[in-house]
Image (cartoon, rainbow, N blue to C red):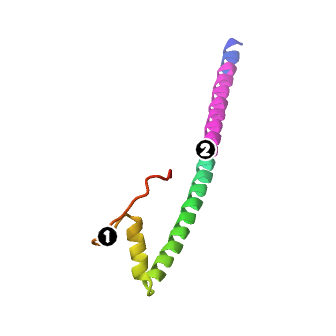
Amino acid sequence: MKSKSLKLNKKAVIRLAVMALVALLAVYCAFTLLSNYSDISRLKAQAADVNAQYEQQVNENDKVKAILSSDNKDEYIEQKAREKGYAKEGEIVFYDISSSK
């Protein structure tokens, strides 16, 4: 009787161990799946931001190309050079240091 009871206990222990292992595997898979969904949603939001920046840059590039192909390109180039602090030869540049920007 002991041997039959002992065999049943071994089978029960093995069955319990397998069920625990399956449960742990299921929890791990669920955690990994949720983590992946989180990463996917974060990366989709990041991709949307990058696409918006790309579209904005394409629009700006189109505007600059239109200006550079027009007759006002010299004025545009001069304006951008002045914004970067350049001046014409012999020109004196004064900076307003009194304002608090």
The residue that appears at 41% across and 70% down in the rendered structure is 80
Residue 40: assigned label: none
- Say few, some or many: other residues with alpha carbon within 10 Å of mark 1 (under 14 / 14 to 19 / 20 or more): few
Marks 1 and 2 sit apart, C-alpha to C-alpha, by: 62 Å
Image position of 95 (left or right of 58): left
Residue 35: assigned label: 2
Please provide the residue range marked out in magenta: 8-34
The residue that appears at 60% across and 44% down in the rendered structure is 35
Please state the total of marks drawn on the protein image.
Answer: 2
Image position of 13 (left or right of 69): right
N-terminal of the pair, mark 1 or mark 2, is 2
Image position of 77 (left or right of 6): left
Q: Quadrant of residue 77?
A: bottom left
Residue 33 magenta-highlighted: yes
Q: Could you tell me what secondary structure mostly forms the magenta stretch?
A: helix
Rendering coords of residue 83 (x, y %): 42, 66
Rendering coords of residue 55 (x, y %): 55, 70
- Say few, some or many: other residues with alpha carbon within 10 Å of mark 2 (under 14 / 14 to 19 / 20 or more): few
Identified by mark 1, the residue type is Glu
**Residue lying farthest to the top in this orientation:** 2
Q: Badge 1 is on which residue?
A: 91
Q: Say if 101 sits above or below 22 in the image.
A: below
Q: For the residue labelled by badge 2, is the local secondary structure a helix, a strand or a loop?
A: helix
